[in-house]
Image (cartoon, rainbow, N blue to C red):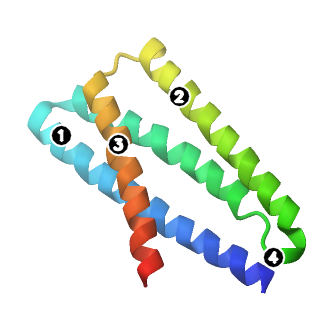
Amino acid sequence: MQNDLAREGKNLAKKAFAAQLLVSTIMAMLVWLASGSHQALSLMMGALISILPNSIFAVFAFRYAGARQNQQVARSFSQGAKIKLAISFILFVIAFKGLNVAPLALFGGFAIATVSYWLALLQQHKQ
């Protein structure tokens, strides 16, 4: 039972990750056609700032499952949330300090990827 819960959670996260990546890629292609490569690369950088931490969080969140591992589940979830926040912060700093990004496109990509992730999770939950 506990392996089924963890497996189900991992499958849900994989589907949400795929949706996030697909929507972000399509949006980057549209932006590239409309505004050029600099805007599109900035959008994809913003999307990656959402995608990478979410993927790492999913690994931590679905590492354990079951009532007997309740404390491990809570601890792993908490660690994953902290690491996700730290990595997001670091990636934003790198993007703004080390790369020549368009801020609006960067935040737009982050928002698009984040919203598509949550919408994919919500859609999968309803099924």
Measuring from the top left, give residue 81's x and y in whole percent: 66, 45
The Cα atoms of the two marked residues, 2 and 1, are separated by: 22 Å
Asked if residue 77 lies left or right of residue 54, the reply is right
Task: In the rendered view, tell whether residue 74 sits above or below residue 30.
Answer: below
Quadrant in the picture for residue 123: bottom left
The Cα atoms of the two marked residues, 3 and 1, are separated by: 15 Å
The Cα atoms of the two marked residues, 3 and 2, are separated by: 15 Å
* Amino acid of disc 1: Val
Measuring from the top left, give residue 96's x and y in whole percent: 43, 17
Question: Callout 1 environment at 10 Å: few (<14), some (14 to 19), or many (20+)?
Answer: some
Q: Are marks 3 and 2 in contact (CB under 8 Å)?
A: no
Sequence order check, earlier mark of 1 and 4: 1
User: What number is the disc on residue 111?
Assistant: 3
Q: Residue at x 47, y 43 (%)?
A: 50
From the viewer's side, name the closer residue of 64 and 24.
Answer: 64
For mark 2, give the secondary structure: helix
* Amino acid of disc 3: Ala
Q: Are marks 3 and 1 in contact (CB under 8 Å)?
A: no
Q: Residue at x 22, y 46 (%)?
A: 29
The Cα atoms of the two marked residues, 1 and 4, are separated by: 44 Å
Q: Are marks 2 and 4 in contact (CB under 8 Å)?
A: no
User: What number is the disc on residue 66?
Assistant: 4
Sequence order check, earlier mark of 2 and 1: 1
Q: Residue at x 49, y 47 (%)?
A: 51
Q: Residue at x 26, y 43 (%)?
A: 28
Q: Residue furthest right?
A: 68
Task: In the rendered view, tell whether residue 105 sits above or below residue 47.
Answer: above
Task: In the rendered view, tell whether residue 34 sits above or below residue 63.
Answer: above
* Amino acid of disc 2: Leu
